[in-house]
Amino acid sequence: MTPVTGIDFERLTLRDALDLAILIEEEARDRYLEFAEQLATHDTPEVADFFARMSRIEERHRMELLERRRTLFGNTRSAVERRNIFDVEAPEYEAARAFMGVRQALETVLAAEVKAQVFFSEALPRVKDPELKALFEELRDEEVQHQALVNAELARRPEKPDDSEAYADDPVAQ
Amino acid sequence: MIEDLVVGLAGSGGDGVVSAGESLLAAASAQGFHALMTKSFGSQIRGGESSCRVRLSTRKVLNPGGVLDVAVALNWEDFRRFGAELRIGPETVLIHEAKAGPPPQDLAPAGRMPREVIGVPLAELAKSSAGTDRAKTTVVLGLLSGWFGIPREGLDRGLQKKFAQKGEGLLEANRKALASGIAFAMEHPLASPRTLTLPVGASPKMLCDGNEMCASAAIFSGCEFFGGYPITPSTEVMQILARELPRYGGVVLQAEDEISGVGAAVGASFAGKKSMTATSGPGMSLKTEILGLASLAELPLVLLDVQRGGPSTGIPTKPEQSDLFAAAFSAHGDVLRPVLAPTSVEDTFRVTVEAFNLAEGYQTPVMILSDQEIAQRKETVDPIDVSRFELVERLRPTPEQLAGGYQRFSATSSGISPISHPGMEGGNYLAAGIEHDVNGAPTASGAIHAAMNEKRFQKLAPLQERTDLFERLGPPDAPLALVSWGSSAGVAREAFLQARMRDIPVKLLVPTLLYPVAEQLYRAFFTSVRAGLVLELSHQGQLYRVLRMFVDVPPGVTSFARSGAQPFRADEVVQRLAQQAETLR
Amino acid sequence: MKDLLSPNDYKSPLKPIWCPGCGDYGVLQALYRALSAIGRPPHEIAFISGIGCSSRIPGYTTAYGFNTVHGRALPIAQGVKLANPDLLVIVAGGDGDGFSIGGGHVPHAIRRNVDLTYIVMDNQVYGLTKGQLSPTSPQGLKTVTSPLGSIEQPINPLLTVLASGAGFVAQATPADMPGMTALIEEAIRYPGFSFVNIQSPCITFGEEDQQLKAHKSRMKTLASLGHDPANQLAALDLARAYGTELYTGVFYRNATPPPTYDAQIRQRKAELQRGEPRPRSRVLDGYLRAGGGPTS
């Protein structure tokens, strides 16, 4: 299942590639925000805050890329659309859980970063343009860095099973 | 000379008893009489016992009448089956097929056997004139013409209507049968002759039944969608609309069941169109949940319930007035929806227009409680000047309201909030059966729920002031009260007139609006009252019970109620009123 | 004039009540995307649903929504569409809403062929009411209302809908977001009754081996099997595997869709209203003629 549809990597321009990267961050940003909302509505405040922070981080990445895009190409219309990408860096919906712990949330983020890294790695051989190659390598490497950060966080937290589910009330029929 | 004649005919379905009645009705109408015809059948689709009664008068006809002036029995078994509907008395002229022999001893209780009984060789006359004994009923029409003065031309036109399409020979044959009936009447005058006064300077009239009036009024009111399902005795409404409504740009859907019928109507209302459904008792039960949905979602809807014998499958072909509880109360939760009831064929038009106005104006389902008698009896109706009706459209949001922050269920002083519909830009909202806030978003908040219930009830408060939906006749300070609704009100009106002629101190109240109960109005009405009757056709006396829920009904006011299929007669109501008047002395 | 509508233009501020991890979140996202691709503005869309977790979905979009009563979304939606055929009408609900209490309405909606799209979020359980048996639960499933294991055979929604003659029948899973999005879009575009059965697992009451992770490994696209969607018989055959196999894609698409019910109504209206327009105020004229009086 390819997370990207309707894009011909061989014909991709630098502008398109930047737009693609921007959309990937945008999708991740929106997904983390959704998770933050879901978890806030379902009494999991600590992780809701965590995902809200993740959302802001992705937004920063997006803005940085957007800046670069504007400097190089101004505000010309993008040829790449949101509909072309599906969960490239955005974690899948099923990753969220009511009462999930921070460790589980970190693992979700880690998985998302790995997904993104794989995406850029696989895209690299199909891309000819040297500037594009440079961009994708940069983006791939960033994902690797992010993973390191997340792993560090994980290491700081003991791997004890999260028992908040045990404290929670039974589900309520509506 | 007589001004009023009630004729009852009974035989089996194959005899064409009902067609004869229709010819008689058409003749009467063409002549300028006021006339009314009811029919009654057995349960077979064809060929079961069959009867009709036709009442003609130079005065407005208020109900099908009590004891028959003329009874025609083609055979005794079938005639006997209609004992309740075709009541005979000493003054009745009883005409019967001679071959059937004299009337059985137990045909009528002691003291009620007709004094004038005439055996006519109907089958023989039919055979010799028309060549078949099936033309019996045409001979009967001739007899009625000869004995009671019903003009021949009118009857001839009736024959034309029935037989012209079925072959020229048949029409000629039946004309001969008519002539032979007239001849027999001339040769055998009645012992106590009575001839109908002919109407003078009569004006054109419509000839129609309650279902036709309801369908026409729906069209007139701007109805654009009908969703329903066949059920006796309301199916005609759907059939008429299926034929007519598309000509006006509307849509009629015969859905797969009662629930999807009203469901589609609610969907159409959500889409912004005036819509309706029609049914009878069993369908009412099924539609209950969707009615509740429409109330909670504050969607306009008109629902016609043509009441029949209940409960459950009951008696599909006979009238009863036992759906009031269901109309007012069914659907769980605190639901308030207006219930209207017409009292005659003519009244059905006005009440249907009113129902659409209330539905659209108050954004609520509105029930119309008709019954089998009103819905299916054919009646002459004076032309209706439709220009006197105002039509109400639902309150829609203004462009300013749509431009920013439109709230579908916003709090307003009247409780009525402007309603948008899909296609209206800026009016997007979530409609739901789930309790909701001003935006339509689901809520479980007790405070919001209370406020919304208050809104839904409050918006209907002006109905309490609608004195125009009540007919009150007679001296306001009369100590005796007669209250009635639906088809029974026709009998009540006649009883009221007769009672007044006997100086019985009675006043009449006929509500069109049955629910919510207009408490102030009833309180004022009952102030002077010490005794009286609430007249209705149901085992429990449902209006009587509902009134007692909301108003202090004086203890002397009793329920005069009985199960359907046994219609009231004016004379028995007058008798009770007279008895009560005695107790007041 | 607004630019092309983005998926977020279809997102309402209402927060879903669905448990985090619910398959319906994916369906909602796919819906935003599909609607954005089709481009009808939210105010021209009527989104009708019944009762159940998945039936809450209209409120999470900016379209006109109508969250009706259990099992009756299809007839109500048909009323909406027939009253205003210019609207884009979508119907949604769960397997219980659609095939238990609503089951009686399904064949009629199909044979009536009003142009609408019916999306069923099938999770083999009654989630909103806490985990009872549903009509698509596999035989033997132990639930709170079948503690010893269900005795009944499940209904096969794909076979039922195909056998009733639907012109577009597909199945999808949020485990394949691009595939599901494309199918929803295609279903909406199909002119007539279209059906998408979405295997959308219940994270709280569904079986562990039925979650999206399992979908990823189990699912097989119909295309990969070489299926030709124009072949109704082949579609019926493949649909029989419902419950055993998770086939995604288009089972059947009628290559020559017949005119929809609403299109035919439109045509009839046009024909009937040719010539003199008929004022509603003259509706009683016919009864005067029937009365046969002096002026008739």
Image (cartoon, rainbow, N blue to C red):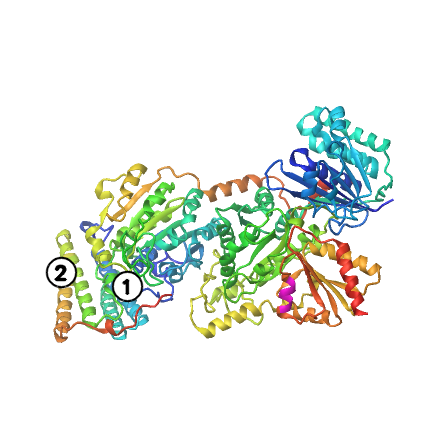
**Res. A146 image quadrant:** bottom left
Give the chain of mark 2. Answer: A
Determine which residue is flagged by label 2. A137
Looking at the rendering, the stretch of residues picked out in magenta corresponds to B543-548
* Residue C162 visible at all: yes
Q: Residue at x 17, y 67 (%)?
A: A107
Q: CA distance from mark 2 to mark 1?
A: 41 Å
Mark 2 burial class by Cα count in 10 Å: few <14, some 14-19, many 20+: some
How far across and how far down the image is residue C144, in percent?
A: 31, 61
Decide which of B37, A8 is in the foreground and name it.
B37
**Res. A112 image quadrant:** bottom left
Determine which residue is flagged by label 1. C204
How far across and how far down the image is residue A63, in percent?
A: 25, 67
Mark 1 burial class by Cα count in 10 Å: few <14, some 14-19, many 20+: some
Which amino acid is tagged 2? Glu
The quadrant in which the C terminus of chain A is found is bottom left
How far across and how far down the image is residue C21, in percent?
A: 27, 63
* Residue B159 visible at all: no
For residue B38: magenta? Answer: no
Give the chain of mark 1. Answer: C
Q: Is residue B369 left or right of residue B126?
A: left
Q: Secondary structure at mark 2?
A: helix
Which amino acid is tagged 1? Thr
Q: Is residue B211 left or right of residue C89?
A: right
Decide which of B455, C8 is in the foreground and name it.
B455
User: Mostly what secondary structure, the magenta segment?
Assistant: helix
